[in-house]
Image: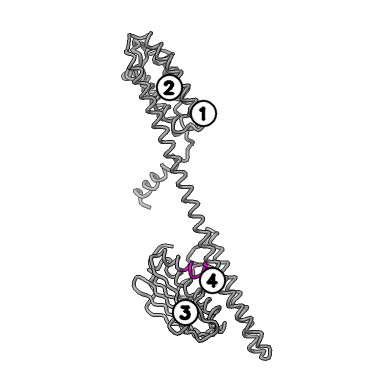
């Protein structure tokens, strides 16, 4: 691998490695920066000044105050209340002693984090901070050089605004979490419905074929060869049902690839042949060349033919049935019809999962679906399915 690509890969891993660190470790550098800047002579008396207390040179108490202001920022998301208390205490010492250090900037950050991450006793915390600010303002006003009272009010309003911004961030984060939860629930519901439709298609088709073949076997007891052939067909149909169900249930296993379990248009020939063995006369015609990538269109086309042939076995058994699959440049057209010459030819109603489910599937891909009586007493199912849509 070239050196420049190796460097790129290493750099790409850094953000992920940083995100895996504990949140206190990620929040600590900013607090260390404020603490270090407070001890640099060039930054002396460049911090927040409240109450106009005369400046005082740094000493051991100043180092302690800077540590109380800056270092607790490492706790601002893990323990926001403790962070706010420690930073407020350091800020009070900073202002009383007249250090006015850069570390005093930590107070609005601690307040913002408390508003955004504090989960319990938020109102009590806000009232306690207000109650603590009043004596702080009174003492600083009397101890300082006479700063106007409205300056203290302005500073309080700024702190209240910062708390409000933190509260807004918290509500926004909660709304986003709720939206993601709702999307996940909707996705799970849609997936369950899709699997239910797949199970309906697979079970209904194969079991219907087996029932028709078993019924026919009743009348073949006098012809052992034909009876053996019919029972073998029932066995083969059962095996196909088991295989299809196994592939379908593999949807729940992320270790299996979707390509291996998705029926394609090419398997329609097998579907037609199985229906023929069940006693239904089926004429199959395929026009055009299948596209290399059809997305979900080939699966939907397969299910349309499967459901239509299942209905032909149930509602028009013995009728001549035709299956036409036409591959266009950007769509697949499917047409399945019966001529009404068999028994009980009618437009199937079903449980609502069959034709209604197909109409929904085709509609999701932006296609058209119809199921209606034919001119000769049978029924016709037509579907135009745009190809290239993602699964």
Quote the CA–CA distance across marks 1 and 2. Answer: 23 Å
Quote the CA–CA distance across marks 1 and 3. Answer: 68 Å
Quote the CA–CA distance across marks 4 and 1. Answer: 57 Å
* Secondary structure under the numbered disc 1 in the rendered image: loop
The image's colouring method is: one colour
Q: Is residue 120 above or below residue 265?
A: above
Residue 251 visible: yes
**Labels 4, 2: front one:** 4
In the picture, the disc for residue 69 is 2
Quote the CA–CA distance across marks 3 and 2. Answer: 81 Å
In the rendered structure, does residue 356 fall within the stretch colored magenta?
yes
Q: Measuring from the top left, give residue 352's x and y in whole percent.
A: 52, 67
Q: Which residue is mark 3?
A: 379
First-in-chain label (4 vs 2): 2
**On the rendered structure, is 177 left or right of 155?**
right
**Labels 1, 2: front one:** 1
Q: Which residue is mark 4?
A: 350
Place residue 30 in its image quadrant: top left
* Secondary structure under the numbered disc 3 in the rendered image: strand
First-in-chain label (1 vs 2): 2
Q: Which residue is mark 1?
A: 121
Q: Measuring from the top left, give residue 13's x and y in whole percent.
A: 42, 45
The magenta span reads 352-358
Q: Measuring from the top left, give residue 51's x and y in whole percent.
A: 35, 13
* Image quarter of the C terminus: bottom left
């Amino acid at each position: 691998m070239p050196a420049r690509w190796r460097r790129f890969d290493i750099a790409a891993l850094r953000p992920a490695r940083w995100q895996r660190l504990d949140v206190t470790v990620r929040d600590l550098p900013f607090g260390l920066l404020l603490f270090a800047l407070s001890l640099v002579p060039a930054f002396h008396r460049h911090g927040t000044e409240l109450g106009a207390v005369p400046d005082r040179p740094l000493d051991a108490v100043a180092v302690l105050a800077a540590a109380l202001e800056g270092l607790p920022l490492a706790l601002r998301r893990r323990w926001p209340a403790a962070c706010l208390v420690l930073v407020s205490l350091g800020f009070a010492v900073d202002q009383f002693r007249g250090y006015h250090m850069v570390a005093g900037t930590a107070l609005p950050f601690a307040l913002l984090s408390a508003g955004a991450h504090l989960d319990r006793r938020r109102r009590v915390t806000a009232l306690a901070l207000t109650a603590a600010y009043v004596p702080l303002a009174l003492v600083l006003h009397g101890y300082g050089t006479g700063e106007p009272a409205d300056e203290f009010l302005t500073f309080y309003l700024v702190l209240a605004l910062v708390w409000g911004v933190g509260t807004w961030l918290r509500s926004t984060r909660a709304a986003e979490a709720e939206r993601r939860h709702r999307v996940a629930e909707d996705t799970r519901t849609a997936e369950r419905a899709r699997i239910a439709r797949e199970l309906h298609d697979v079970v209904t088709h194969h079991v219907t074929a087996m029932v028709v073949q078993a019924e026919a076997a009743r009348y073949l007891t006098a012809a052992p060869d034909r009876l053996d052939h019919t029972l073998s067909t029932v066995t083969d149909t059962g095996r196909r049902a088991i295989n299809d169900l196994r592939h379908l249930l593999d949807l729940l296993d992320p270790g299996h690839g979707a390509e291996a379990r998705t029926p394609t248009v090419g398997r329609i020939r097998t579907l037609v042949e199985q229906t023929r063995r069940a006693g239904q006369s089926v004429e199959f015609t395929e026009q055009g060349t299948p596209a290399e990538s059809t997305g979900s269109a080939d699966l939907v086309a397969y299910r349309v033919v499967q459901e239509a042939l299942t209905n032909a076995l149930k509602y028009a058994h013995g009728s001549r049935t035709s299956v036409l699959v036409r591959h266009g440049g950007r769509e697949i057209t499917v047409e399945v019809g019966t001529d009404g010459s068999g028994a009980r030819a009618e437009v199937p109603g079903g449980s609502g999962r069959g034709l209604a489910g197909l109409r929904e599937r085709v509609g999701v891909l932006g296609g058209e679906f119809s199921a209606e009586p034919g001119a000769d007493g049978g029924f016709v199912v037509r579907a135009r399915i745009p190809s290239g849509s993602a699964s």
